[in-house]
Image (cartoon, rainbow, N blue to C red):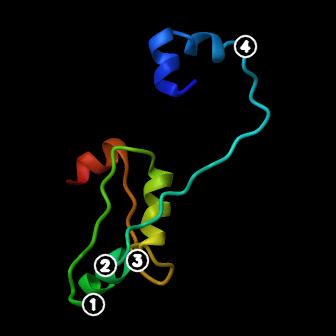
């Protein structure tokens, strides 16, 4: 049966019953084409580039590194929670 047929018949609940997870995987969202290059051009033009997120700080830092917003040889400021609100 297709997913729609299972939904119509109400059989999904029985399919997802008593499942055990034996492994897990992760999916990395790739940056869209040209993002890193665009950020580099902004930085070369003297424009400050920031990352704001409502998600996890670790995820934002990983994305910022992948996009070349955070680089090891630069001074970086990472703030979160009340600390960030107080400084804004």
In the drawing, does residue 32 fall left or right of residue 65? left
Distance from the alpha carbon under mark 3 to that under mark 2: 17 Å
- Whether residue 61 is situated above or below residue 73 in the rendered picture: above
Report the residue marked by disc 4.
18
Which residue is at the front of the view, 56 or 85? 56
Spatial separation of the CA atoms under disc 1 and disc 3 = 16 Å
Q: Residues within 10 Å of mark 1 (few under 14, many from 20)?
A: few
Give residue 53's mark. Answer: none
Q: First in sequence: mark 2 or mark 1?
A: 2
As drawn, the residue found furthest toward the right would be: 22
| C-alpha distance separating marks 4 and 2 | 47 Å
Residue 69: image quadrant is: bottom left
State which tag comes first along the sequence, 1 or 3: 1
The residue under label 1 is: 44
Q: Of residues 16 and 57, which is closer to you in this image?
A: 16
Residue at 50% across, 62% down:
62
* Front tag of 2 and 1: 2
Mark 2, residue position: 39
Residue beneath label 3, please?
A: 75
The residue tagged with tag 1: helix, strand or loop?
Answer: helix
* N-terminal label among 1 and 4: 4
- The answer to the question of whether label 3 and label 2 lie on touching residues, with beta carbons closer than 8 A, is no
Q: State the image quarter where residue 50 is shown.
A: bottom left
The label nearer to you, 1 versus 3, is 1
4 or 3: mark nearer the eye: 4
Q: Residues within 10 Å of mark 3 (few under 14, many from 20)?
A: few
């Amino acid at each position: 049966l297709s997913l729609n047929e299972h939904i119509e018949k109400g059989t999904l609940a029985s399919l997802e019953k008593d499942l055990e997870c034996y492994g897990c995987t992760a999916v990395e969202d790739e940056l869209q084409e040209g993002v890193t290059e665009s950020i580099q051009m902004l930085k070369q033009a003297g424009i400050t580039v920031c990352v704001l997120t409502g998600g996890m700080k670790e995820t934002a830092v990983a994305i910022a590194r992948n996009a070349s917003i955070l680089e090891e040889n630069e001074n970086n400021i990472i703030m979160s929670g009340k600390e960030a609100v107080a400084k804004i």
